Amino acid sequence: MHLADPPLHRVGVVVDTPQHSGLSGPLDYLCADALAPGTLVRVPLGRREVTGVVWPLDAAAAQALPEGQLRQVAEVLSGLPPLPAAWRALVGFAAGYYQRGLGEMALMVLPPELRELDDVQWQRRLRRLHKALAADPGSAADPEGPALTVQQAAALAALAQAGAQPCLLWGSTGSGKTEIYLRQSEQVLAAGRQVLIMVPEINLTPQLEARVAQRFPGRRIVSLHSGLTPAQRLRSWLMAHLGHADIVLGTRLSVFTPLLRPGLIVVDEEHDPSYKQQDGARYSARDLAVFRGRLEGVPVLLGSATPSLESWFNAMPVAEGGAGRYVRVAMPARVGDGAMPRVRVLDLSRAPKPPLGQAPPPLAQELLAAISERVERGEQSLVLLNRRGYAPVLHCSDCGWKSGCPHCSAWRVFHKVDRSLRCHHCGFTERVPRACPDCGNQDIAPVGRGTERLEEQLAEALPGARVGRIDADVTRHKGALEAQLASVHAGEVDVLVGTQMVAKGHDFRRITLVAAVNPDAALFASDFRAAERQFALLMQAAGRAGRDALVSGHSEMWVQTWHPTHALYQTLRSYDYAGFAAQQLKEREMAGLPPYASLAMLRAEGKTQEAVQAYLQAALAAVEPLAEALGGVALYPPVPTPVQRVANVERAQAMIECPQRPALQRFLAQAHPRWLALAQQHRRSGVIRWAVDVDPLSI
């Protein structure tokens, strides 16, 4: 007589499935044990075995397969607590709001190495981690921080009064916002809870990590960003999830880090566009941080000297026409009573022209003289040019040939250091030709200027000055950025040339002059956010000067421009962010743009522009009745993207606008199945992929 086999339990598991598969929710499997939601498992999927996350099943699902047709869970990754309910709620919300598959979102936010491990490998990693933690038990003793200014004390009091309501910390550059983050973290750590601090870019992580480690020497601090090895990312993620890490520092993906005892979320430089993912699941980490804070009942602190207009609007009282969702805490003064740099707008139209046949100076003579004075006094200057490379394009004066990219609708940038032409979109690189490929003329010349050329020109114009450069080209290798920054801090650089990556977050104590060389390009751009981004960049760049109170009195921000009377520069003179924001919000309200409306972009890519446009036109036609039924949803005709072709792939987009975000979400949820079906039909005609970008940063 044989004993009956124990009954198998039906469990739902989300796995990473392609968008076009239509499988967006949990798949049914069988397991000998009842598994808690959030448990990590390995399951068969087709001919593969993949990692999945156990998810609550919808008991009312009418399409449930009979158990005889279900496959069994291959193995459970034991020893790891289930991912918490708040994490699952965050992932579920992000998948629904940003129109992605639940499994795609859930697996995307897990460490890559975790998705590849079986249970044996997993147990080995856990034993290694616990052994390391036992050797370094950590300490909970936190030394006291520096004395607070009156302004900082008032800000902390306002934050305490706000409780768990999201707060916008609007503080000028150098006002001591980081000290507020640390004080708030100190209170949370003392209560036995964990802190998540987010920064927009990897290059800001080492500086903040050093500051936090100095302040909390006995605490366990981990980093989470793409610059880590897969093993390092998994270790940091595990320490956070198991509750061993006290403070987690990370870039945008860290918003999904599971925390055992969450107590505070900080989003530094909350206005930065790097918080928005630009491919795949196009989520906003800043917005998800606010949602997560509400889910877990913890305060969220958004910090910036130039808040995004959406956050500014959310922090405006309802009586002033705002949303009143956030508490705004202002810190307008710099620590130590240091003054912000005096802004000098230099009118290039009035600058003297060089003699005929003589090359123009790299900067206006007046600005060069001001930088030279700084060099003589042993002070530093920062010259901002947000364009890397030697020159944007090479040009033949005989036939008009330009160094276009054969794979993109863009120019290849000339890099003199390695004599290459490099496309910054697809990466296609070639050696510079000896002569024009079209007519054979050997006199091909660079047109325009990038940071590499500006560095060379300044070294020639300022003999004896030590000129350095920081951009993506010179910081590609591991440790290069840290070495370059260390040389600046040590006073080994007199004039620093850099892109936007050095204009924010860095505490350069010796810089007394900042110059924006070519800021006019964004003034007349078609993108409605261009002015906002440019104002933020210039304000952040100005904040690099005069951070030491001893030199702040004669620090300056120079702006070279052909449009000195432009309103943006006039508000910059007085650092009047509130006035700038009021004007921008007024224009946006009149135009029906965010934050007074919600946008989504339906984007498509394909082999030809005709195929992509045909799909988008069909997609809009298929949902036009739906838009009319819901009311208020406006569909705009498809157009090519600003860079139409990248890596031989044609791209186009169609904008969808709605005054109310919930109505837009209902529309997108109902439109998604129709677009998915259409994409499968148009795949034969050359449509490669399509996606919905909710709350796009650019249109």
Image: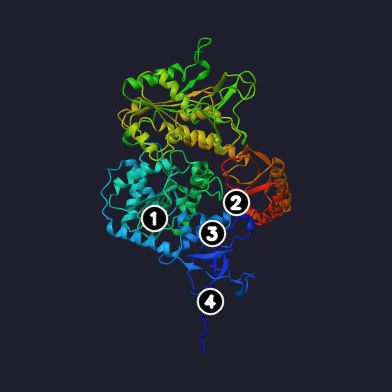
Q: For numbered disc 2, what is the local secondary structure?
A: helix
User: Image check: 622 left or right of 216?
Assistant: right
- The residue closer to the viewer here, 241 or 548, is 241
In the picture, the disc for residue 8 is 4
Instruction: Give the alpha-carbon distance from disc 3 to disc 2, as whole Å.
Output: 18 Å
Instruction: Give the alpha-carbon distance from disc 4 to disc 1, as whole Å.
Output: 34 Å
Q: Seen from this angle, which residue lies furthest bottom?
A: 1
What is the x, y in percent for residue 348?
51, 19
How many numbered discs, if any? 4
Q: Seen from this angle, which residue lies furthest top?
A: 355
Type of the residue with mark 2: Arg
What is the x, y in percent for residue 408?
61, 36
Instruction: Give the alpha-carbon distance from disc 3 to disc 1, as whole Å.
Output: 25 Å
- The residue closer to the viewer here, 634 or 64, is 64
Indicate which disc, 2 or 1, sits on the residue closer to the N terminus. 1
In which quarter of the view is residue 172 placed? top left
- The residue closer to the viewer here, 125 or 259, is 125
Type of the residue with mark 4: Leu
In which quarter of the view is residue 698 placed? top right
Instruction: Give the alpha-carbon distance from disc 2 to disc 4, as whole Å.
Output: 43 Å
What is the x, y in percent for residue 93?
54, 57
Type of the residue with mark 3: Gly
Q: For numbered disc 3, what is the local secondary structure?
A: helix
Q: To which residue does mark 3 refer?
A: 92
In the picture, the disc for residue 235 is 1
Tell me if residue 29 comes above or below residue 571 in the rendering.
Answer: below
